Image (cartoon, rainbow, N blue to C red):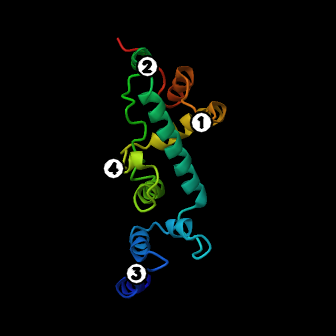
Amino acid sequence: MTVMLAEIHRAVVKKPEIDPTFIIEALCGADYWAIPFRYSGIFPPNSCPPEVVKEVIDILDMCDFLESSIQNLPEGEMRRLDEHFSYDFDKIFVGFDGNNEHWHMGVVRMLTGQLERFSRFKDRELNSHSPITLERYRRMFSVFAPLRLESMGRRLSFQALERILEAGYGRTVKG
């Protein structure tokens, strides 16, 4: 019913205070959490747990910061990173497992889509197809959080990047 009312609202009101297209997309995508996120105080949250939204925002912030830091590494440090890990770090954020982490995927979809946050991840595949992805992000975040505070918004040092990546991917020697 709400979707039908939003459709009518969209057709009748020229400059609505509440974006009916956003409401329809949030409802149809079961991203109910996004409505109070955008229109706080009007709609009560009743779906995705707030701790999931916070966790996804923390993970996206971390991945954005890591990818930016890695992209700005000098060539010699990039080579060292490549030597220590058997992973291509151009994309740290690879989504969440669609079978087990649907709330997380929905939050990312809404944040990068309608809410226009974390634009770096907007067109990425959101399904990692891996049940270990969320745990990897959590391990990395536990190392990242205190280092991020210490960095005071500046690029992370090579040593800090190594510690965070090792927490998520382990260290391997290519041979």
Residue at the image position 50 percent from the left and 65 percent from the top: 34
Are circles 1 and 3 on residues that touch, CB within 8 Å?
no
Between disc 4 and disc 3, the foreground one is: 4
Report if the CB atoms under discs 2 and 1 are less than 8 Å apart: no
- Between disc 1 and disc 3, the foreground one is 1
Query: Label 1, label 3: how many angstroms apart (C-alpha)?
Result: 41 Å
Earlier sequence position, callout 2 versus callout 3: 3
Label 4 or label 2, whichever comes before in sequence order: 2
Structural distance between the alpha carbons of marks 4 and 3: 26 Å
Q: Residues within 10 Å of mark 4 (few under 14, many from 20)?
A: few
In the image, residue 18 above or below residue 152: below
In the picture of the structure, the residue carrying the numbered disc 1 is 153
**Mark carried by residue 54:** none
Name the residue located 41 percent from the left edge and 29 percent from the top edge.
71
Q: Which mark is residue 123?
A: 4
Q: Check disc 3 and report the residue beneath it.
A: 3
The structure residue drawn at horizontal position 62% and vertical position 73%, both measured from the top left corner, is 41
Of the residues under marks 4 and 1, which one precedes in the sequence? 4
